[in-house]
Image: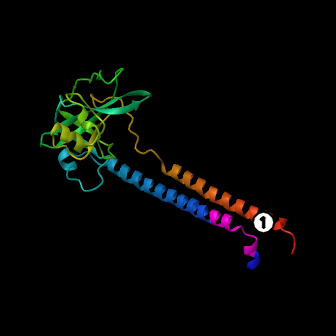
Amino acid sequence: MNQLFSIINLRLFLFTGFFLFVFIRLGFWQLDRAEEKETQLIEQAATEAAPPVSLYTASREKARLSGQSIEDRGLFLEEVVFLRDNVIFEGTVGFEVMRPFRSETGEMALVNFGFVPGGIDRSVLPVVPALTKINDLAGRAYIGEWANDAGIELYTGWPRITPTQSPLANGNIAQLPLLPFIVRLDSSHPDALPRFWPLTVTSPDKHRGYALQWFLMAVALLTLFLVFTWTQHKEQPDG
């Protein structure tokens, strides 16, 4: 045992041990993330396969809501138009158009219609298409990580630029009691605009790929340590 410790570089041993732990821990963390994403995809598929519900029912949902199909009758508030800022679609910078919808039973939700290209500068707002189906709502509920609402009060008038989709922040600006989720208008709706709304950014397989990379780095590090230690041992004069 004493002979073994005599050929090991203590600093290199501690360095290798620390990063070996880090790499392995990161690998298992990525595997955990892969399992979480698989669970989310299964839950999402089940939610999307469920029959449509009204805003009244959705507002009382206890289970996972994001992805739930929404169908209702009511009225879009045509003059209250939010333009979500800094949206890029197919290489073009612009806005996402959002309007509140009030159901016949009184629930109000913010509806995202999709993308419109921006003008040459902020002083020229885009032309927002007029509505053709002001009484029909068909879409899917969406709950996400809402962007920071800093600067939301810098703009006035309608349409109004907003930095966030947050129903709470935009509802406060419009003084409307919006439900705590967005409704993304179905692409088949006559008033739908172009959009790119991917379900998830990173797939479970990609997380597993990241995990494999971390594990391979751990193997490489351990191999280099063993080779270096063995080389140092062989270079020592026989005593």
* Mark 1, secondary structure of its residue: helix
Q: Nearer the viewer, residue 150 or 64?
A: 150
Q: Is residue 165 magenta?
A: no
Could you tell me which residue is drawn at 17 percent across and 47 percent down? 56
Q: Residues within 10 Å of mark 1 (few under 14, many from 20)?
A: few
Residue linked to disc 1: 230
The image shows residue 150 at horizontal and vertical percentages of 29, 40
Question: What stretch of residues is rendered in magenta?
Answer: 4-16
Count of marks, rendered view: 1
Q: Is residue 40 left or right of residue 73?
A: right
Q: Residue furthest bottom?
A: 1
- In the rendered image, residue 176, in percent from the top left (x then y), is placed at 15, 40
Type of the residue with mark 1 = Trp
Residue 15 lies within the magenta run: yes
Q: Is residue 161 left or right of residue 219?
A: left
**Residue drawn at point x = 32 percent, y = 43 percent:** 148
**Foreground residue, 214 or 129?**
214
